[in-house]
Structure formats: structure tokens, C-alpha cells
Amino acid sequence: MATAERLTFVLSCTECKNKNYYFAKGKKKDYKVELNKFCKKCGKQTLHKEGKASK
């Protein structure tokens, strides 16, 4: 059974640039993830964009 390689990414708030959510996805994905998530620092739901995790 072959194991797929996974990369760790982070979702960061577009307003305050706070890194809130970490997730993993496969290497072959061509798209960037953009989701509306709750930001604890802003105190509201804002757009979060994918960036690289510094681990």
C-alpha cells in the first residue's frame, strides 16, 4: 500500500495576519485554500488564506 505525502499548511487571517489554523493536504493540489473562519484576535469571522507553516 502506497502512502501519500502530506504537507502542513497554515490558514492566516487576512486582516490581522494572525496564524490560526493548521491543516495538511496532498502535494498534488494546485489550488490555494481560502475560507471564512473565526479569528480569535479580531473577534469576528474573516477570510483566511493558505500560507506555509514554519515547522
Image: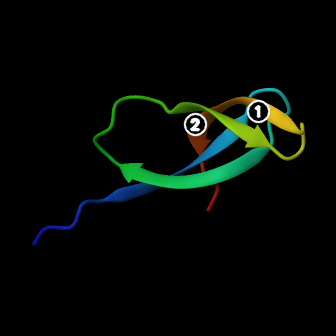
Residue type indicated by callout 1: Gln
- Across and down, in percent, residue 6 comes to 37, 58
Residue type indicated by callout 2: Glu
Could you tell me which secondary element the residue under label 2 belongs to?
Answer: strand
- Between 37 and 29, which is closer to the camera in this rendering? 37
For the point 58% across and 32% down, the residue is 35
Q: For the residues carrying marks 1 and 2, which lies nearer the camera in this image?
A: 1
For the point 75% across and 27% down, the residue is 14
For the point 64% across and 55% down, the residue is 54
**Residue 36 located left or right of residue 15:** left
- Across and down, in percent, residue 43 comes to 89, 39
Could you tell me which secondary element the residue under label 1 belongs to?
Answer: strand
Q: Give whichever of discs 1 and 2 has the lower sequence position.
A: 1
| The residue positioned farthest toward the left in the image shown | 1
For the point 33% across and 47% down, the residue is 27
Residue indicated by mark 2:
50
* Quadrant housing the N terminus: bottom left
User: Image quarter for residue 44?
Assistant: top right
Residue indicated by mark 1:
45
